[in-house]
Image (tube, helix red, strand yellow):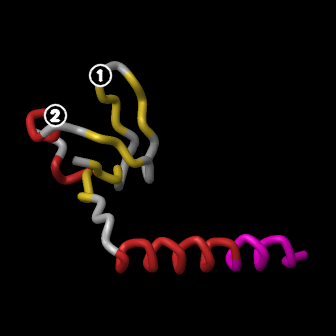
Amino acid sequence: MKYQITKTDLQINNKLHSEGSVVELTKDQTKGIEDFLIPVDHSEQSVESKKKTKSSQASAKEGKGNKK
């Protein structure tokens, strides 16, 4: 199952994954780190949510560039 990493970076199988990364893990691999993982849902609602997040992040970046 795929999970998005949240709250921190995680080292899994000797590879560092940054916060916000999506990784595919087995149920056994998630033991002990459940608090830092959000299951990724591939439903249409999830896709719409991601689009809104990207749009708001782009707007925020534009706003930062305008400050002097």
Task: Label 1: state its secondary structure.
Answer: loop
Most extreme residue toward the right, as rendered?
Answer: 68
Q: Is residue 50 above or below residue 38?
A: below
Q: Is residue 2 above or below residue 41?
A: above
Whole-percent x, y for residue 23 in the image: 35, 42
**Rendering quarter of residue 55:** bottom right
Whole-percent x, y for residue 7 in the image: 35, 54
Is 19 positioned to the left or the right of 51 in the image? left
User: Which is nearer the N-term, disc 1 or disc 2?
Assistant: 1
Q: Which mark is residue 29?
A: 2
Query: Badge 2: how crowded within 10 Å, few (<14), some, or many (20+)?
Result: few
Q: Report the residue at 53% width, 75% height from top.
A: 51
Query: Badge 1: how crowded within 10 Å, few (<14), some, or many (20+)?
Result: few
Q: Which mark is residue 13?
A: 1
| Residue range highlighted in magenta | 59-68
Image quadrant occupied by the C terminus: bottom right
The residue type indicated by label 1 comes to: Asn
Is 25 positioned to the left or the right of 11 in the image? left
Of 37 and 64, the residue lying toward us: 37
Count of numbered labels shown in the rendering: 2
Q: Report the residue at 26% width, 58% height from top.
A: 38
Q: Report the residue at 77% width, 79% height from top.
A: 63
Is 31 positioned to the left or the right of 60 in the image? left
Q: For residue 60: magenta?
A: yes
Q: For residue 17: magenta?
A: no
Q: Report the residue at 26% width, 51% height from top.
A: 36
